[in-house]
Image (cartoon, rainbow, N blue to C red):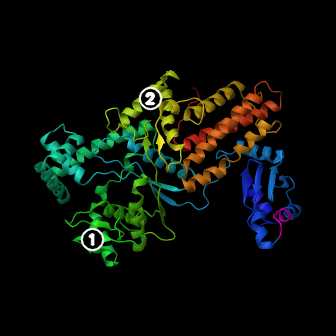
Amino acid sequence: MNLEELLTTRLAAAFPEPAVRRSPHADFQSGAALALARELGQPPREIAAEAIAGVDLTGVATAEVSGPGFVNLTVTDELIAAALTALVADDRLGVAPAPQPRTVLVDYSGPNAAKELTVGHLRSTVIGDAAARILEWLGHDVVRANHLGDWGTSFGMLIEHVLEVPDGTYPEARARFAADEAFRDRARLRVVKMQAGDAETLELWRRLVDGTKQQLLTAYRRLGVTLTEGDFAGESGYHDLLGSVVDELTAKGLLVDSDGALCAFPAGFTGRDGGPLPLIVRKSDGGFGYAATDLAALRHRTGTLGATRLLYVVGAPQQTHFAMVFAVARAAGWLHDAVSAEHIAFGSVLGADGKMFRSRAGGGISLDALLDEAEARPAALNPDPAVAAAIGVGALKYADLSADRRGDYVFDWDRMLALTGNTGPYLQYAYARISSLLDKAGTFTPTVAIGEPAERALALELLAFEPVVHTVAETLDFHRLAGYLHGLAALFSTFYERCPVLKAPDGVRESRLTLCLVTGRTLRRGLDLLGIATPARL
């Protein structure tokens, strides 16, 4: 039980909903009296005073009424010391596994196999991997799904182009498709051959997809992402399920013929003209669009894989699409009270000009080129290639995860790699400094005794790790975990400046080394949950 829960339990004797929170005015604060004032017809300060008088906080905290009726709670130093000492022997740092583990499917990265992996894929990959890591650590059965775009028009044009130009690339194929009507017709016929199982077409398709998968896996390894070959879940895998999806939705009365196309019209969605907005499941030419594939995937994930929480880590522009897909799935009975689906939306990566981040030539920046730069730039900080890569890649990931995922963020190498401020290298440096200090200290017996304000502030923040982790696992707001880790590192810096460690007298020395030990372990675990490496030496 963390401190917030302990205080909530004690105050529950006086308040139906204690509403205990961390506060800048005390260790914790409750505003429950203000909420009860109107209901009871009493001044909130009187309610708060009566509550304090009737609650047993012995050995836990002292309480006082503040302002209009807040209850300020100051935890005893003895309780803080005892709770922190208990963390030393706990590999999980006080973070208990989820009481009711679920099967959680995380759909992330999802590049188009015909195209080059670019910086545009970075956010889904980094955010999705952090989600998979934190949920897995909490004991959930996590299914990673890399929804690879390996079917449809893009592959038709690429295969047709490669048959004519063996070393051809997707940008070349796309340019021909846009400018050459005859090629456009041949590419569309090639899609039909793919769908019909033409042997020559499928053989070339397999070779192209296999080659792309290997390139992707190399990029994932460089990025420190946990996606593996077994996590690829290509669109092609749902091809044989599309017909049955249409049949089931039709039988349930959810599809309507609209100019030859079969569409769903979930309630509450309107187009620009004010009319109902269609979700096209089967096109008028008999082909299937993204909606059909997404519905087939969702039905497979809930019905066959048994997932009870589905997370789609996809850019914010797809918000309406997924809301409509989820609405149709709910109407079909594939989603219900025990099975949820969430669109984990995120914004764009912008350049210094506030526009989409692109190369100087105006094109998309390949992820390989970005990772090359990530590994090269930190060489001035550390000439060891492995350490430099850990710093650079960590800086990339932290810049993404430390911002609210729903908003855009500006890509800036200088800011990302700074050793001060809210950056990945700052946290990695804090961890490395602690590792060096503990190496110099040698063996010691862990114990905690709170004496100085900086010790107390650091200890109290260390005990806040557990609620932060559980909250982030629910909201997937990783900037809150990043913000916690940055705040912890800043408090450690203050502690380190004001409280000598190695030269402290016996007893105090062991206590301060214990604070260092738990801080290092917390930083390392927290950064690992974000997918960021922690070299012991920078």
Residue positioned most to the right: 53
Magenta span:
42-47
Location of the N terminus by quadrant is: bottom right
User: Do the numbered discs 2 and 1 sit on residues whose CB atoms are within 8 Å?
Assistant: no
Labels 2, 1: front one: 1
Residue located 75% across and 41% down the image: 457
Residue positioned most to the front: 273
Asked whether residue 226 is in view, the answer is no
Q: Amino acid at mark 1?
A: Leu
Q: Quadrant of residue 435?
A: top right
Q: Position of residue 433 (x, y in %)?
A: 64, 28
C-alpha separation, residue under disc 2 versus residue under disc 1: 50 Å
Label 1 Cα neighbours within 10 Å, binned few <14 / some 14-19 / many ≥20: many
Q: Position of residue 176 (x, y in %)?
A: 17, 44
Helix, strand or loop at label 1? It is strand
Q: Position of residue 398 (x, y in %)?
A: 52, 39
Residue 262, disc:
1
Residue 373, disc:
none
Q: Quadrant of residue 510?
A: top right
Q: Amino acid at mark 2?
A: Glu
Height in image: 72 above or below 17? above
Sequence order check: which comes first, mark 2 or mark 1? 1
Location of the C terminus by quadrant is: top right
